Amino acid sequence: MIELARDDGLWTVTINRPEKANSLTGDMLAELAEIAESATDARALILTGAGKVFSAGADLDEARAGLAKSDLWERLSGAIAALPCLTVAALNGTLAGGAMGMALACDLRIAVPGAKFFYPVMKLGFLPQPSDPARLMALVGPARAKLILMAGQRIIADEALQFGLIDRIVAPDMLLDTARDLVADSCAANADVAAGIARLCGKSGS
């Protein structure tokens, strides 16, 4: 249910469980974290999903059994944030719940026009993962972070672009091509130069 394609330094990771809105099980989270932790020699990483939803967050049955509070979410987002290469979340549809963390940890986020963004942890009786609010505030500011986390608002793609939550809105049939275009210069550049620029831009893992 997690697919990895490698092409000359470009790693493309696809969540492939469209029949369940790409909801994430513990095994899927662990596999995603292991991939991110092993991608230290990747020149760029693209994270996307199959179907019309990027991810609905935790699998409901496993969430009730404790996955919602698992440290796997933080392990995954931390591993993505620590990568020295350019990372892009190519959001093929709605991004919800704990799945928000992996997208927030990426350097860039692009999304299709119909994507929606929401993180209903408070309503469900959980805290967000520790690093997610800070990353969200860094992108959209404190008030808009509260709009999402505390007011429980669903943000549509146009609003997300205006807020700074995503960087571009892209037609569905151009999503992966656009993501590949965004990482092309990093893949072609001297790895030390790319890592140096990442450090200058405040990327902590470089």
Image (cartoon, rainbow, N blue to C red):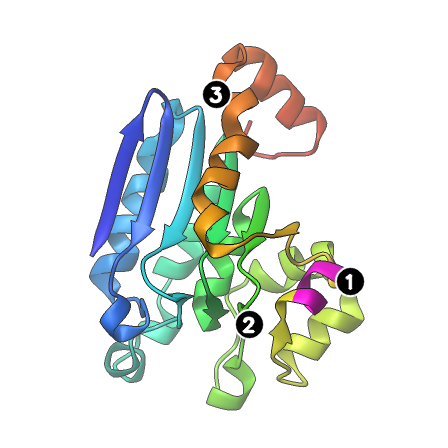
Q: Which mark is residue 33?
A: none
Q: CA distance from mark 3 to mark 1?
A: 31 Å
The amino acid at mark 1 is Gly
State yes or no: discs 3 and 1 in contact (Cβ < 8 Å). Answer: no
Q: Residues within 10 Å of mark 2 (few under 14, many from 20)?
A: many
What residue is drawn where x is 79% and y is 72%? Answer: 143
SS assignment for the magenta stretch, majority? helix
Q: Amino acid at mark 3?
A: Cys
Q: Residue at x 44, y 24 (%)?
A: 43
User: Element under label 2?
Assistant: strand
Mark 1 or mark 2: whose residue is earlier in sequence: 2
- Which numbered circle lies on residue 116? 2
Vertical side of 14 occupied by 192: above or below: above
Q: Nearer the viewer, mark 1 or mark 2?
A: 2
Mark whose residue sits in front, 3 or 1: 3
Q: Secondary structure at mark 3?
A: helix
Query: Would you say the residues marked 3 and 2 are in contact, meaning their CB atoms lie under 8 Å apart?
Result: no
Magenta span = 158-162
Callout 1: helix, strand or loop? loop
User: In this figure, what is the number of numbered marks?
Assistant: 3
Name the residue nearer the viewer: 80 or 126. Answer: 80
| x and y, in percent, of residue 126 in the image | 48, 81
Instruction: Give, as a three-letter code, the residue at label 2.
Output: Lys
Q: Quadrant of the N terminus?
A: bottom left
Q: Which mark is residue 187?
A: 3
- Quadrant in the picture for residue 140: bottom right
Which mark, by number, is residue 141? 1
Q: Can you say whether 85 is above or below 75 in the image?
A: above
